[in-house]
Image (cartoon, rainbow, N blue to C red):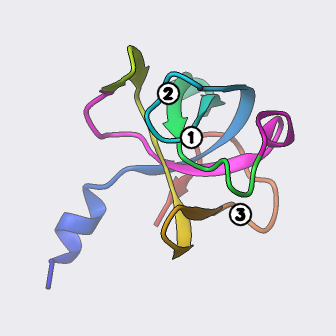
Amino acid sequence: MMHIEDFLRVDMRVGTVIAAHPFPEARKPAVKLEIDFGEELGIKHSSAQITRRYTAEGLLGRQVVGVVNLPPRRIAGFKSEVLVIGGVPEEGDVVLLRPDELVPDGSRIF
């Protein structure tokens, strides 16, 4: 079991997808995302393996939840700064988490 202090170190925020592009260079099917996390954090980039349910075009304007305090990862030369969060009903299938109502970009998740 982890302690609440461990959980509170994970900085999860709501952001809005402002750009999305196919990422054919990635080993597994993925999409490159630009996500606006508000004034404090700004725009961050993410590579997300979410192509089973989502198209790049369909993600524009959608609010998502992401972990914003992990170290960046290089994926096929692309700097991924955010881990977008979703439920995984089965291997290779991700259902993105998002708020029920619009909230300001950068809103914290607790």
Image coordinates of residue 50 in percent, x first then y, are 61, 50
Magenta residues? 55-73
Residue closer to the observer: 41 or 46? 46
Find disc 3 in the rendering and name its residue: 99
Q: Is mark 1 on a helix, strand or loop?
A: loop
Image coordinates of residue 19 in percent, x first then y, are 73, 24
Q: Is mark 2 on a helix, strand or loop?
A: helix
Check the image and report above or below for 106 versus 33.
below
Find disc 2 in the rendering and name its residue: 41
| Mark 2 or mark 1: whose residue is earlier in sequence | 1
Say if the magenta span includes residue 7: no
Check the image and report above or below for 72 versus 63.
above
At label 3, the amino acid type is: Pro
Image coordinates of residue 45 in percent, x first then y, are 52, 25
At label 1, the amino acid type is: Pro
Q: What is the quadrant of residue 5 in the picture?
A: bottom left
Find disc 1 in the rendering and name its residue: 29
Q: Is residue 34 left or right of residue 100?
A: left
Counting every numbered tag in the picture gives 3
